[in-house]
Image (tube, grey):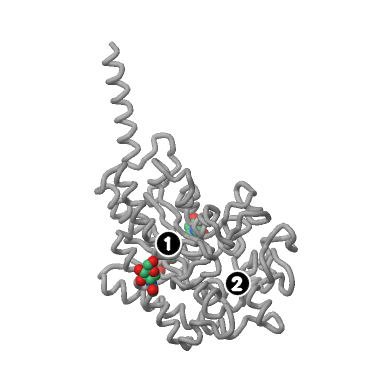
Amino acid sequence: MLSSLSLTIIFVFFYLNLVWQAGTSPIDGSKTKNSPPAFFVFGDSLVDNGNNNFLITSARADSPPYGIDYLSHRPTGRFCNGRTMPDLIGEQLGMDPLLPYLDPEMYGKNLLKGANFASAGIGILNDTGIQFVNIIRMPHQLMFFEEYQKRVAAIVGSQKTKKLVNEALVMVTCGGNDFVNNYYLVRHSLRSVQYKLPAFVRLLTNEYQNILMRLYTLGARKVLVTATGPLGCAPSVIALHSRKGECVTELQRAARLFNPQVTAMIGSLNKRLGSNVFISAQAHHIFYDFITKPKAFGFEVTNKACCGQGPYNGMGLCNALSHLCPDRAKYVYWDGYHPTERANRLIVKELFNGTKYMKPMNLSTLMSVDSNKG
Ligand SMILES: *[C@@H]1O[C@H](CO)[C@@H](O)[C@H](O)[C@H]1NC(C)=O
Ligand SMILES: *[C@@H]1O[C@H](CO)[C@@H](O)[C@H](O)[C@H]1NC(C)=O
Ligand SMILES: *[C@@H]1O[C@H](CO)[C@@H](O)[C@H](O)[C@H]1NC(C)=O
C-alpha cells in the first residue's frame, strides 16, 4: 500500500518533470508557437534589468522615479521610466520579463526561460566604465553564460541545454559607453591620446567581433546585435557640449563611423560562418528618425531629458529631487542618456516589423524562419 502510493508519487513527479523538461507548461497555454524557448541578453544600461542592484557600484537605477511606469511602478534597476527593449521584445514573444542573472530567484525552472547578464556602465573594452568600479564587464558576462549552461545541464542534461541555447534568441547591446564613458569622458583621455577616432572605432569593431564569436562558440545561433544610438543627441551630452540644443557634432561623428562598421562586420561574420547567425539592428538610424522627425512618431521633446536637472534637464543623475516632466510619452529621452519606454516601444516595433534598418532580416522573419524549422 505504502509502496504503491510512493510509486504513484514518484510517477507523477516524473511525469510533471517530463512535461516541464519539454518546455511546455501544462497550465500556461498563452505561449505562442513562435516564441523562442529562451532569451538571453548581454550589454550595458540600455538593457540591464537589475544586475547592478546586486553589486557595489554607482551605476544603478534602483531609486524613484526610475520605474514609475513599470508594471510594479517601482524602481527595478532598469534605466527607464518603464519597460526596456528586452522587456518589450519578450512581451512581443509572449514571455514574462527575464530575471537578472544575479537575482536570487534565478534557479531551477526560472533558469530555463533564459537570463539577462547585462550590466550598466560596461563597454566593449575592459577599461570602459572603470569609474563605476564593480560592474560585470563583457568577458565576465560571457563567463556567467558558461556557468549558466553548466547549471542548466545539471538539471536537464547537456544535450537539452545545447538545444535550448542554439534555439534561443540572444540580444547584445554595447558600445555607447566606450565613447561616452571612455574616449570622450575627459578631454585628452588615455584612449583619445592613444587612438585617433577612426582607429579607435576599428579597435572597438574588432573587439565587438571577438565578443560575438565567443557567443557563437558558446552556442548562440540567433543573435540580435545593436551598436549605438545617436550619442551626440543625448541630453547629457547636449547639456555639456551643445550651444543651442543641437546634436553635438563630434559624438555624432563617432556614432556615424561606428554603426556602419558594426553592420559590415556582422555581414562578413555571417558570410564566414555560412549562415545568418547575427542580425544587425541599425539603432542609430531608428533612433535618429525620432529626433529629426519627432511629430511623425508623436514626440514633442527630443533634446531634453524627462528626468534630470540643469540645462536640457541633462545634468547629473535622475533621482527623487530631479525635475520630472509631466507627460513622459512626449519625450524621447527619459534621463540624460536613456530612452523612455515609449521610444523603446517604437524601436522594438522596428526590430520586429522594419524593412529599412534590419540587416539581413527583421525579428518577425527570424522568428518565422524559426517556427518553420521547429
Ligand atoms: C579583457 O579582460 C579579459 C579577462 O578578464 C581578457 O581575457 C581579455 O583579453 C581582455 N580584453 C581586452 C580587449 O583586453
Ligand atoms: C508587427 O506586426 C504585426 C502584424 O501587423 C503586429 O501584430 C505586431 O504587434 C507588430 N510588432 C510590433 C513589435 O509592433
Ligand atoms: C520584415 O522583413 C521582411 C523582409 O524584408 C519584409 O518583407 C516584411 O514586411 C517585414 N515585416 C514583417 C512583419 O515581416
Give the amino acid type for the residue marked by disc 1 in the picture. Met
Residue shown at 40%/72% (left/top)?
359
Q: Residue at x 43, y 86 (%)?
A: 199
Would you say 37 lies left or right of 272 here? right
Q: Quadrant of residue 246?
A: bottom right
The local secondary structure at tag 1 comes to: strand
Q: Distance between the residues labelled 2 and 1?
A: 22 Å
Whole-percent x, y for residue 35 in the image? 40, 50
Instruction: Kindly identify the residue that appears in the image at 46 percent across and 86 percent down.
Output: 194
Comparing 336 with 285, the one in front is: 336
Q: Quadrant of the N terminus?
A: top left
Query: Against 207, is 153 above or below?
Result: above
Q: Residue furthest top?
A: 1
Residue annotated with mark 1: 171
In the image, what residue occupies the spot 62% across and 70% down?
296
In this view, the residue in front, 362 or 7, is 7
- Whether residue 29 sits left or right of residue 333 in the image: it is left
The answer to whether any part of residue 282 appears in the image is: no
Is label 2 in a helix, a strand or a loop? Answer: helix
Q: Which disc, if any, is residue 264?
A: none
Query: Is the residue marked by circle 2 packed among few (<14), some (14-19), or many (20+) residues within 10 Å?
Result: many
State which image quarter holds ligand 3: bottom left
Q: Position of residue 313 (x, y in %)?
A: 71, 70
Specify whether residue 140 is in view: yes
Label 2 sits on what residue type? Phe
First in sequence, mark 2 or 1: give its number: 1
Please give the residue where the numbered disc 2 appears in the rendered image: 290
Is the residue indicated by label 2 positioned so its CB lies within 8 Å of ligand 2? no
Q: Looking at the picture, does residue 84 appear above or below residue 230?
A: above
Residue 269 location in percent, x, y?
A: 31, 73
Q: In this view, does 360 lie to the left or right of 342?
A: left
